[in-house]
């Protein structure tokens, strides 16, 4: 399992959390998505490394902006 933490800009409410979670959960191999609204951090657990472009596209599709990533 691979776990990565992404910084997402623009999330302000539960609808934001649902939108981002839904888009990221649709990526192949994603097992779990946890969103910490106050910090704007999204933790994604997946079976394997995810394509950074696919992650950015999913967050963009949800209406938000990927601003960074740290590996944990």
Image (tube, rainbow, N blue to C red):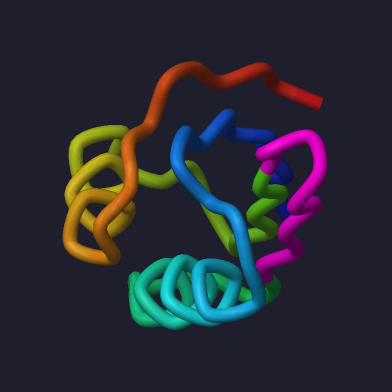
Q: Position of residue 50 (x, y in %)?
A: 40, 46
Residue at (71% x, 49% y) in the render: 43
Q: Is residue 26 left or right of residue 14?
A: left
Asked if residue 72 is positioned above or below residue 51 in the image, the reply reads: above
Across and down, in percent, residue 37 comes to: 75, 52
Residue nearest the observer in this picture, 37 or 21: 37
| Quadrant where the C terminus is found in the figure | top right
Judge from the rendering whether residue 63 lies leftward or rightward of residue 33; answer left or right.
left
Residue at 81 percent across and 43 percent down: it is: 38
Tell me the residue at 69%/73% (across/down): 32
Q: Which image quadrant is residue 65 in?
A: top left
Closer-to-camera residue (34/51): 34
59 sits left or right of 10 in the view:
left
Residue stretch in magenta = 33-41
Pick out the residue farthest to the front: 12
Instruction: Say which of 67 and 12 sits in front.
Output: 12
Q: At x 35% / y 74%, what residue is drawn?
A: 23
Q: What percent of the width, then of the height, locates residue 6?
A: 58, 33
């Amino acid at each position: 399992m691979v776990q990565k933490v992404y910084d997402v800009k623009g999330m302000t409410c539960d609808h934001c959390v649902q939108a981002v979670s839904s888009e990221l959960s649709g990526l192949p191999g994603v097992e779990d998505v946890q969103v910490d609204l106050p910090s704007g951090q999204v933790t994604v657990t997946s079976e394997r490394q995810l394509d950074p472009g696919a992650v950015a596209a999913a967050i963009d599709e949800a209406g938000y902006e990927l601003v960074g990533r740290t590996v944990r």
